[in-house]
Amino acid sequence: MAKRILWTVNGLLPEVAKKLGVTPPEKGAWIFSLFTQLKELYGSEVEFHLVTCAKAAKQSMHVEMDATTHFHILPMRKNAFSRCYDTELDLLEKLIRQIDPCLVHVHGTEDFYGLVTERIEVPVIISLQGVRNEIIKYLFSDISKTDYYKIALRYRDYGMIKNLKVWKRKTDDENKIIRMNRYFIGRTLFDKGACLGINPQAEYLTGEDHRLLRPEFYAADWQLEESEPYSIHTTISESSFKGVFLIINALEVLARKYPQIKLNIAGTFNGPIAKSLAATIKKKGLTPHIHFLGGCNAGQLVASMHKSRVFLMGSYIDNSPNSLQEAQAVGIPPVAAFTGGIPSLVDDFENGLLYPRGDLYYMVHLISELFDNPELARRISANAKKLKTTRNNPERLKELYKTVYARFIENPTTSRL
């Protein structure tokens, strides 16, 4: 009889989305790439049950993809993330007891799923993704707290103020999750330090980055000669710690030396922050230099990276950003801050360039180095591409998970705590 493993995830499996007639998600797509690889590895030996909560779901749903793949969607109250999660945890606990898995794997501490551990007897592994406990310290790095409130009040968007309360609540929940659980999979020295700092008794099962990329990034092959001179690509969100205003300030400085410079921005911007960003761009006279790409699929991201000369991250804090690893796989030379988990992903002047967090002029200098020194750009690119055959190698990642899971699959009596 097949062993059962239950995953909690933060979105729909693409095949499920298609069945339900909704757009497949781009965010978190790497998790489903990993799932596909593990499904192939285990075959009929393991039955996977993937679970997510959705506000759009009016009742619990079960989608059977095949004999060994099941997707469950649980309903979520409209304001569950800003209140207690008892109703959602009741549904999750009930489902886990029905399925009776030998292991529950919670992907991420950003949401409430990891709180279910104290209700069940099954071992639970928590995969660390973002580390809210550290990120919250840098929420007002790109925009001061005063300016943040001014923007919210100017546009009468009180949801921005509510979001700060949600951040605090989710950070408190993350701390509870890390304290109450025993088994963790991490990616960087940054998340290892944060995890063991909160819970010194935690078992950190692996600290190797286990990010599996989408196929388009493995196939990509950036070439300097095919990229446009003085062009930059960034994949970014409007979250203030991501540093979009820092990037705009860097563009302003760079435009004085490179008047033909271009910035391609992949990401969705809405509401007051988007309006404030647009006003800043206009005030600085940078509108002709910026191309907003909107939300992009993997193919569109690869196309933009191929035609750009530098990949730029403005984050004041980050753990193991997808976009950085995607850029390295494509081969576009990346520039990012020495902050959070990024030093675990980038060897400075080997497969990327690092500047001190928030240092505008150091960032500008490194971009100029790549613009003006083709040999440096080629060397960084060549070294970055190697990572998709080592760090992000699908076969290596499958073996890593097989080793971690074996402890629980082969020994069902493994303690949950």
Image: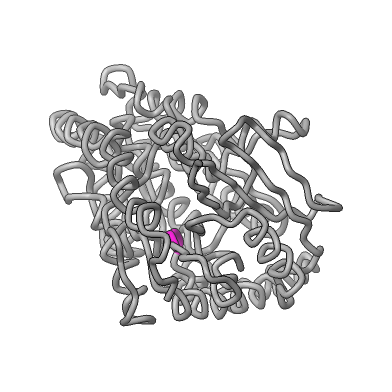
Q: Is residue 105 visible?
A: no
Q: On screen, 131 above or below 145?
A: above
Q: Nearer the viewer, residue 388 or 205?
A: 205
Q: Position of residue 221 (x, y in %)?
A: 30, 22
Q: Is residue 346 visible?
A: yes
Q: Nearer the viewer, residue 153 or 383?
A: 383
Q: Residue furthest front?
A: 1
Is residue 15 found left or right of 286 in the rendered image? right
Q: Residue furthest top?
A: 226
Q: Nearer the viewer, residue 152 or 103?
A: 103
Measuring 73% from the left and 63% from the top, which residue is drawn there? 91
Q: Main secondary structure of the magenta part?
A: loop
Report the quarter where the C terminus lies: bottom left
Measuring 69% from the left and 69% from the top, which residue is drawn there? 89
Is residue 361 found left or right of 372 in the rendered image? right
Q: On screen, 254 above or below 95?
A: above
Q: Quadrant of residue 254?
A: top left
Q: On screen, 70 above or below 138?
A: above
Q: Quadrant of residue 287?
A: top right
Residue range highlighted in magenta: 126-130
